[in-house]
Image (cartoon, rainbow, N blue to C red):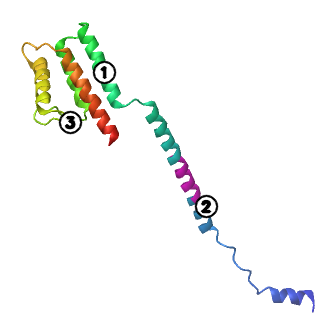
Amino acid sequence: MKTDEILARLADVELPTAPDWTPTWYALAGVVVFAALTFAFFLRRRHVREERRATPAPGAEARARVDALHDAWSRGEIAPRTAAYRLATVLRLALGLRQLDAHAPPSGIEAREWAVTLERLRASRYGRHPVALETELFTRIASWIARYDTATCMS
């Protein structure tokens, strides 16, 4: 046989099509995206843990604010009305309340004590002649914040 005849016979043979790599590329892209998301998740988780360790407990910060308010009030740097406003705000935020309600004390606080404290704060904030604040008020509020912070940390 001559070369031309052999080549003529091969002319009608079709080569197989090239393999389709599209599914492979999609799978590889999915693996890369999954790996990137997993890496980002663990980085974020580590960042949040470090941030929690560095951030003081909210109760400790609230107690520090109550102490600073007491010091400023006792030195006469702020008026009793201003101190009462700020004290009520710190109490409300530290206990996680939307509003201070004399009829609904937080758990673990005696209802009568709660009502008397809120009445003194109300009279000092809104009264025509503000009621003088007492050191006992600051101490009581700081102890409630400490008790609430301890209770929420144990939960």
Q: Is residue 92 visible?
A: yes
Q: Position of residue 114 (x, y in %)?
A: 14, 29
Q: Residue furthest bottom?
A: 1
Residue at which label 2 appears: 28
Q: Residue at x 11, y 25 (%)?
A: 116
Residue at which label 3 appears: 108
Residue lying at 50% horizontally and 48% vertically, measured from the top left: 41
Work out how far the residue at label 2 is from the one at label 3, CA to CA, in angstroms. Answer: 57 Å
**CA gap, disc 1 to disc 2?**
54 Å
The reply, left or right, for residue 24 in relation to residue 80 is: right
Residue on which disc 1 sits = 65
Describe the element under mark 1 as helix, strand or loop. helix
Q: Residue furthest right?
A: 2
Query: At label 3, which amino acid type do we have?
Result: Gly
Magenta region, main secondary structure: helix
- Crowd rating for badge 1 (residues with CA inside 10 Å; few <14, some 14–19, many 20+): some
**Horizontal relation, residue 52 to residue 69: left or right:** right
Label 3 residue SS: loop
Quadrant hosting residue 77 = top left
Q: Which residues are magenta?
A: 31-40
* Amino acid under disc 1: Arg
Residue 155, quarter of the rendered image: top left
Q: Is residue 101 above or below residue 155?
A: above
Q: Is residue 71 above or below residue 44?
A: above
